[in-house]
Image (spheres, grey):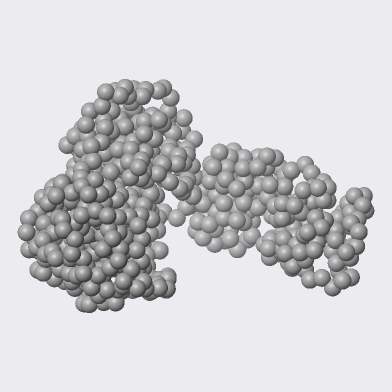
Amino acid sequence: MAAAASPDRAHRLLVVAMDFDFYRQAHSDLTYADIDPAGHYGAAGWREGRDPAPWFSTDAYLEQNPDVAQAGVNPFVHYLRSGYREGRAISRSQFADAYYAALANGDVPITAAERSAAAEHFDARFYQTMNPDLAKVGIDPLDHFLRHGWREGRDPSFEFSVADYLELNPDVSASGVHPFVHYVMTGRHERRPLKLDLTFRQAALGRLQSFEGRLADARRWARPIELTQLGVLAEALANAPARGLHLTFSHDDYSRSVGGSQLCVQREAAEFARLGVNHLHVFPANGWPTVRSGATRTPMGVLLNGETVGSFVPHDITRALKSYHAEGPRSFAIHQMLGHSSRDVVDIVRAAGMNAGYFWLHDMGSLCAGVHLMRNDVESCGAPPPQSAACGVCIYGAARSGQLREHELLFSRLDLTVIAPSQVALDTWREGSDFGAREALVLPHATLVPSDEPPPMRDGPLRIAFPGTPSIHKGWPVFNHLANRFAADPRYEFFHLASKPATGTTARHHHVAVTVDQPLAMRQAMIDLSIDVALVWSLWLETFCFVAYEAAAAGAAVVTSPESGNVAAFAADSGHGLVLRDEQALEALFESGEILQLSRSVRRPGLFDLKFSRLAAELAPA
């Protein structure tokens, strides 16, 4: 290999060969930094994987030339001095296409007067919060937006959408002028529309995928499953350390997935473990959005006492259970039927020597493949008659008859006791079905117990939290709209409490992960943050909703809608919150400031502990 170039010669080579404009624009943290590009790349940039020109990829050159990487020399300098003579291959920068496209479009010239007008309407805090990738020293948010951000679809404020403005004003789009500058200089005086007047429900309908498309995706995403030998399951059962057996069915692996129903199965398993009873869990090895029918050869994952045994077809599970002769109590609970057929479940249950068991109403999957009972995933439907016009316009309508038929077969063949976590859930289920259940009862997942712990009090803005997964059916768009609209309002602070942060929000993320070992993590987070209001604006009929109880236990007021099922019942009946008629009434409370009456300092709430139920372990024979 040729000797490395001297520092002075290397710098001169870089000055001649580098594309300084490209270097700054491709690496946005350098766009407005006061640096010498050649000096920066020579000292640090190449080690950070930055590209010096659109036609040269630093990382690709080092990967294709391990001798250069091992020598620890600057790859671009190496290529300029000797690599090109040796015929070494080079690759384009991953940023080249975007850079050339920007050159083709040309920069939109902006005068000092236009920049000043734009600054009056530009929300720097919103821009920085919504674009955390730009949180670098030396980057001016307004300059970035005016030069690059608008081309990348970034918005300058909550009120203005670049994409919508261009779509609503085709003459502006055709002219090639800067859309935001056009608005502040001309469009606002002409009362041009800033955003498409779409609700989040309308936007969701625009993205709605057919049920057939979801089935096709499930087939496409299904991973190959290598079936385990039957003897492995038979041996595991024979060597199970406890007595008896509690058998459960659900739609996924509760030991790996996170959610309310998964936590219920985990707690149920833990309760039977404390009773000294073995727990066998059966779930589809690949997820499936509806029930199956008949005797299938669907690969089923199997857990025994929380440990993975393998994947087996239903027939092999029945064979293994027929050979299981250990003494002790036996029971079973069906938590979810998605991915199962009634025939398979019945065969497995009877092979284990049982016919009477429990059926949980964690959702309304026994009434429809749309387990949340939301018409087209945006509006609560209340389970109308299967042949109604309402079902005819819903993506789940065609699949509903099969869902009902499989559950009717299940209830006709097994002696099932229905367990609902709330009266609302049980009433809804009874109104929507005529299954022949042996018995139906209410067993809440948790209850509130007064605590001696002193409640936290603090001064300052009202703290509003969205606890949990940021999904539409949980009301995330409603919360996010408020968080973004009132981001600069000094009266409010918004928090998102979840295991993972969400994009496109000004709400501050706080990591929270509820597990069997940390069942009160959400409650504790809301106490530590002194959350005043928990927005639990569920669009579907919640059968229970842990976060509503966790919020009340932490002293937060639960604010919800009439559609939220047990959340609305809990908030109204217990005095732990407020039920508002719709999103407009909710937003009006924030506009007027009336929501401030729910602050801790005004309400002086107490704290509660949560007493969790033992689930099916409370009912099954010991």
Residue 594 in view here: no
The quarter of the picture where residue 410 lies is bottom left
Number of labels in the image equals 0
Question: 86 or 311: nearer the eye?
Answer: 311
Q: Quadrant of residue 92?
A: bottom right
Kindly tell me whether residue 451 is visible in this rendering. Answer: yes
x then y, percent, for residue 526? 37, 34
Q: Is residue 429 left or right of residue 604?
A: left
Q: Position of residue 353 (x, y in %)?
A: 14, 65
The residue that appears at 92% across and 52% down in the rendered structure is 6
Q: Is residue 232 above or below residue 491?
A: below
Q: In which quadrant of the rendered view does residue 529 lie?
A: top left
Residue 60 placed where, x, y %? 72, 64
User: On the rendered image, what quadrant is the N terminus found in?
Assistant: bottom right
Residue at 36% in and 24% down:
456
Relative vertical location of residue 85 with respect to residue 125 in this rendering, above or below: below
- Residue 361 % position (x, y): 19, 55
